[in-house]
Image: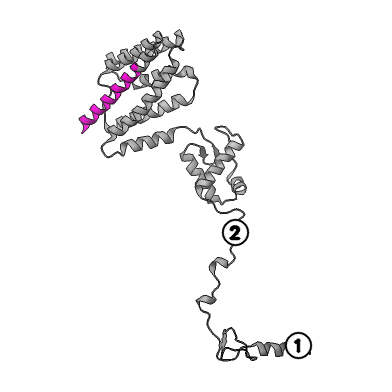
Amino acid sequence: MSERRVSDDSRNDSPSSDGRSRDGRPGDGRLGAGGPREAGPKDAVPRSSAPRARSVREPRVSSQIQREVMQLILDRRLRAGAPLPTEAELMESLGVSRNSVREALKALQALDIVEIRHGYGTYVGEASLTPLVDGLTFRTLAQQGDDTGALAEILQVREVLEEGLVRRVTGTLSDAELARLEAVVERMEKAGRAGRPFPELDREFHELLYASLGNALVPQLLGAFWTVFRRVAGVRGWTDDPTPDVTVRRHRDIVIALRAGDVEGAQKAMADHFRGIEARAAQESRGVG
């Protein structure tokens, strides 16, 4: 009996061909005389309301994953050379795919933050300034013929850095440290007389000059600027120091001021040294052009 009643009620609620229900109420118009009509655009379920599969965590771009890997290294206090978790472990802990992990690790390797050893795993890198050197070298060479101006900017930064550093070490160096600096200058002089270039001795002088500070970043920064200069000079075919005697004298002036404890004299000698480098670079550029 109840089944018959349900059937009658359903029949009464069904719309007629004119779009009205059999009891006279307006119907929804979905059914016509010929059966169900085709659904229009308004009838389609909005795509945004359709359920979609979601991972445990929201998708993240590579830069975000890179930061999370770096944070993992910091949180675990991993030192250079220490092994990182495996790809599978990183996938699980970060909630990302294998491809995302690999992409992030490759980007971090380019920054020397991690080192990928194929067949062995991934390790914490040295975080050296090699990426900075590469970027500055490219920036300088890409100046469309004005690489001398770009190189002068690098030399100015180095000059400001070294003038501040030489001020700090003046009056603090021991006789033994000053003697080592003088010995390097003497080797420069001998090389110059023999017609041999001495760029490595120049670099050694500046590293020894600030070694007493005990600041590991100083030789790295100075070495980065030095390497950029040498790379650009090599690409442009610039000759070695055309006036080695002047270069030797300027380094000797620095040592003389240091031994006298003359801060202003040491800074002036350092500034003169860089004026010579800038003038030489400009001269070489004009000669090539």
Read off the residue under disc 2. 54
Query: Residue at 60% across / 91% down in the picture?
Result: 16
- Is residue 167 visible in the rendered image? The answer is yes
- Label 2 neighbour load within 10 Å: few <14, some 14-19, many 20+: few
Residue 171 left/right relative to 119: left
What is the magenta segment's predominant secondary structure? helix
Percent position of residue 188, x then y: 33, 15
- Residue 233 within the segment the image draws in magenta: no
Q: Earlier in the sequence, mark 2 or mark 1?
A: 1
Residue for point 34% across, 17% down: 268
Q: In the rendered view, would you say 287 is above or below 120? A: above
Which residues make up the magenta segment?
268-289
Q: Position of residue 206 (x, y in %)?
A: 40, 20
Q: Position of residue 273 (x, y in %)?
A: 32, 19
As drawn, which residue projects farthest toward the front?
A: 25
Residue that label 1 marks = 3
Of residue 76 and residue 87, the one placed in the foreground of this image is 76
The answer to whether residue 107 is above or below residue 1 is above
Q: Residue at x 49, y 23 (%)?
A: 215
Rendered image quadrant of residue 196? top left
Q: Secondary structure at mark 2?
A: loop
SS class of the residue under badge 1?
helix
Instruction: For marks 2 and 1, give the one nearer the viewer.
Output: 1
